[in-house]
Image (tube, rainbow, N blue to C red):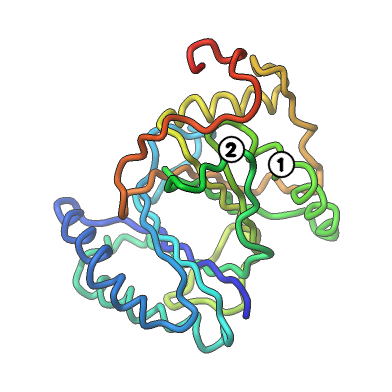
Amino acid sequence: MALYTTIHLHNVPPGREPEYAEWFDGEHQTALANLRGFLAADRYEVSDAQIMPDIDQPWRFMSVYDFDLPTPEIDVPALGPLIAAVRDAGMITDNETERLYTYRLYSDWKASPNWQQEEPFSGVSIILGNYVAGRGTEYHKWYDEVHSVEVTNVPGHVAMKRGELSPIQIEPRHYCPGDQLILCANQTDDLLFTIRDFSARARGVSPSGIAMEPRSTAGSFARTVHYFDKVSGTRFWTGGIAYAGDLSVYPDKS
């Protein structure tokens, strides 16, 4: 058995959003439950707040499908017909923006003390990234031992999992700009604060006094970052913001 995640990046024609949401939370979930190895599926909408506000956000919606598969070469493509049905029904915008990418995960969620396990995620961020050719070992060591810890300890960030683009993909196939998937889970109702403190820690100017290590040169700058809010199941997250450490450095949050 191996963990796989498929991300479906797409847009929905104006006015058909409620119809799409009803399909996803109803008929689609029922069909997914019959797929071998299916674990979970959630749907997200692009956030107003972004850590890289100058890059394109071509997708309003993203669905994330998680599987534990005995035979991925057979089971990964089985998701295709389920998505094709809603595409054929005209509920996915036909403007060449739709993308389906499947990744084989290195591990399940790696959580920080911020994670409130009794609460749902409020959203996720994804990085479609790459490492410098020949420096994969260095890149993975940096992520596993340094950067994943730094990122998930930022207030509002709670867990991370990563994967590598699978040779098994779902039709229709398109070029994928990121061989590496970094999926970070959030629990916050103040995403802008989370993004600002993440940026401040990276630059060594956070009010917390915490500064991240310099970014590894093994990580390519050929990457895109996208923040999404969860819109399936529980629409609004009301648990405040997940913190670890001394709240006194955040006078308006304690």
* Residue in front for this viewpoint, 61 or 251: 251
Q: Mark 1 belongs to which amino acid?
A: Val
The N terminus lies in quadrant: bottom right
Examine the rendered structure and indicate whether residue 8 appears above or below residue 199: below
SS at badge 2: loop
Residue at x-position 48% and y-position 30%: 241
Examine the rendered structure and indicate whether residue 38 appears above or below residue 184: below
Q: Tell me if label 2 and label 1 are in contact, CB under 8 Å.
A: no
SS at badge 1: helix
Q: Quadrant of residue 3?
A: bottom right
* Residue in front for this viewpoint, 131 or 183: 183
Disc on res. 149: 1
* Residue in front for this viewpoint, 2 or 243: 243
Per the image, the residue denoted by label 2 is: 114
Residue at x-position 64% and y-position 14%: 207
Q: Residue 189: x percent and y percent?
A: 40, 32
Q: Mark 2 belongs to which amino acid?
A: Asn
Q: Is residue 144 left or right of residue 57?
A: right
Q: Residue 10: x percent and y percent?
A: 36, 58
Q: Is residue 55 left or right of residue 27?
A: right
Q: Residues within 10 Å of mark 2 (few under 14, many from 20)?
A: many
Examine the rendered structure and indicate whether residue 221 appears above or below residue 244: below
Query: Reading the chain from its start, which is encountered first: label 2 or label 1?
Result: 2
Residue at x-position 58% and y-position 67%: 103
